Amino acid sequence: MAGHSKFKNIMHRKGRADSVRSKLFSKLSREITVAAKMGLPDPAMNARLRLAVNNAKSESLPKDVIDRAIKKASGGDAESYDEIRYEGFGPGGVGVIVEALTDNRNRAAATVRSTFSKNGGNLGETGSVSFMWDRVGQIVYAPSAGSEETVMEAAIEAGADDVETDEDGHTVFAAFELLSDVATALEAALGPARSTNIVWRPRVLTPVTGDAVATLMKLIETLEDDDDVQHVYSNADISAEDLEKLAG
């Protein structure tokens, strides 16, 4: 997983700050509206909404924008969004999972399919990739949360399954159904997390080298730039040398 997480961090450092921030705020707001619409509009009574609001706050989404997104869910003019998962293969046979929230299924499918085909990949059937992945809880902490040993001890005590630590921070994984309990215990021990999400975690990584690395990065960046797309996951394993070339 280390190669994958470093790859993602490098992509996010490549100078797209303003437009990325705007798109991120839009996607965070959409997730809040959908979560509020699917359950009660009170984060205390709606676990998905609570996750969405906490993640929005960790990304500095203004409080009035959060409140507006929740209120939008109860309004008669609120858009109806469909949750769709697309699965496919990128350059080098890398597995890619795309999660979308869209008000137009046909547009979303056409755009995702086109993006795959233009960037050395191909869209597969539902289940063609995800059977090799686990649906798990992911809690991310900044490096300042503590040493690797401190975070590992807190994670074990909280009932987590695994911890990955690198220069960008600590990523704690927990069983899907235990996420809320583990997150609460970790917050008591380490303070507020940077983010808490339910994610796809690959069981097996696929090595990618050479020119395929840049093509794969373009595929994932283009998908992430799509307004309908909320999350993109890959099981790419990229060498430190190729990562340095990307960052250069």
Image (cartoon, rainbow, N blue to C red):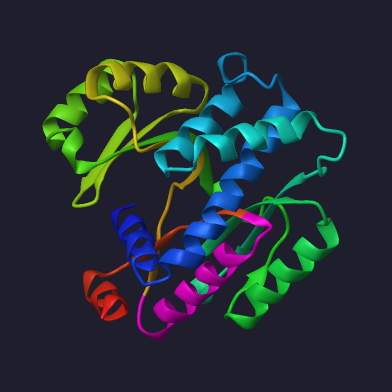
Is 235 above or below relative to 45?
below
Q: How far from the left and from the top, in percent, is residue 112?
A: 69, 67
Residue 94 visible, this angle: no
Residue 68 higher or lower than 108, as above or below: above
Q: Nearer the viewer, residue 188 or 7?
A: 188
Q: What residue is at 18 percent from the left and 23 percent from the top?
A: 153
Viewer-proximal residue among 179 and 237: 179
Please, what is the dominant secondary structure of the magenta stretch? helix
Q: Nearer the viewer, residue 172 or 74?
A: 74
Which region of the structure is painted magenta? 209-229
Please give the count of numbered marks on the rendered protein. 0
Residue 171 placement (x, y as % from top left): 31, 40
At 18% from the left and 52% from the top, the residue drawn is: 167
Name, please, the residue furthest toward the bottom.
211
The reply to whether residue 139 is visible in this rendering is yes
Residue 60's x, y, as percent?
42, 43
Examine the rendered structure and indicate whether residue 188 appears above or below residue 232: above
Work out which residue is located at the far front of the displayed protein and give it: 64
| Residue at image coords 82%, 32% | 75
Judged left or right of residue 26, residue 161 is: left
Q: Quadrant of residue 97?
A: bottom right
Which image quadrant is residue 35 in? top right
Question: Quadrant location of the C terminus?
Answer: bottom left
Q: Find out whether residue 227 is within the magenta segment.
A: yes
Query: Is 70 a magenta residue?
Result: no
Q: Position of residue 132 (x, y in %)?
A: 53, 49
